[in-house]
Amino acid sequence: MTSKIDNIDLAFTRKPGSGIREEPTYSGALSFARRRYTKNLEGCDIAVVGIPFDLATTSRPGARLGPRAIRTASSMIAWDRVHGWEFDPFENQSVVDFGDVLFDPGAPAGVPDEIKAQFEDIHRQGVKTLMLGGDHFTTYPVLQSLAQFHDEPISLIHFDAHSDTWEEDGESINHGTMFYHAAKQGLVDPTHSVQIGIRTYNEDTHGFNIYSAEDVQAMGVEAVVKKVKNIVGNRPVYLTFDVDCLDPSMAPGTGTPVIGGMTTMTAQQILRSLRGINLQGADVVEVAPAYDVSEITALAAATIAMNMVALFASVKA
């Protein structure tokens, strides 16, 4: 018989491999979805890793507090199965909260390599990562790490209001240029990658397939997903979700909000319909709690991340 003491602070008391269990949403140690905190990745399938970094922002800062906010919001939805899926994604795969990566903010030039090195150690163990940002630049060193363990460029499925492919001379730590560099370096294959929800101007697509927020509304979820799956095929996929892809009415807590975005319902429908893709890594980024209202942005991000956990699991279900 399980004692009462084992039903609280599941971040520390949870037995490896256990699925959904109830814990009071208003108390207990805060890990992502009440998963076990551990640095030991033996037998682990998915490691949830925070990158509390926002020195690459070009507008309002604050996304360094995003991982903490997403973990807190996830405690409100960790008591039930992920809605819209017919299975418990925590039962058929081992998911742990690895905590946050460590870097020296006083030496910003070295931060990307510090992040990359820590993700290399995780990926080298055959563990996939669900990253919680942080500003969107944090995706870049994760992609650099992951690409080393694949024989072909990665297909990127990118939800955002911005293309993040603006050109620049040289290479700066900037959350608006990293996918330009990722494409140039062959980390990702633009012709087999998709950007969804874009609604800011960039004169050059750099070969990426783009479906604006207006395209999504006009085409509908089913048509968009069909095109996305045809584009990425069976190639290794990295899924990145900037919360400013959502309309600011549903996600105000972000650094560079743009009106006219997708609803949370549409985003969830697309994510659920992507089951079957060869998902190798994922992230949710750009949650800036200082600008949030009643934690609705953090809740949206946490729910999106839970759907990503289900996407990882869908190939096993």
Image (cartoon, helix red, strand yellow):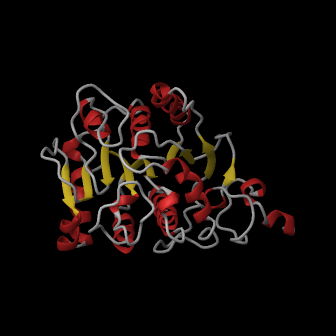
**100 with respect to 284 (left or right):** right
63 versus 138 height, above or below: below
Q: Quadrant of the N terminus?
A: bottom right
| Residue nearest the viewer, comparing 292 with 28 | 292
Q: Residue 189: x, y in percent? A: 24, 39
| Residue nearest the viewer, comparing 238 with 142 | 142
169 versus 97 height, above or below: above
| Residue nearest the viewer, comparing 266 with 62 | 62
**Residue at the image position 27 percent from the left and 71 percent from the top:** 221
147 versus 246 height, above or below: above
**185 with respect to 201 (left or right):** right
**Residue at the image position 62 percent from the left and 61 percent from the top:** 72
> Is residue 239 something that shows in the picture?
yes
**Residue at the image position 42 percent from the left and 65 percent from the top:** 252
| Residue nearest the viewer, comparing 51 with 182 | 51
Numbered-mark total: 0
**Residue at the image position 73 percent from the left and 72 percent from the top:** 24
> Is residue 235 something that shows in the picture?
no
Q: Residue 130: x, y in percent? A: 50, 49
**303 with respect to 176 (left or right):** right
Q: Residue 195: x, y in percent? A: 25, 53
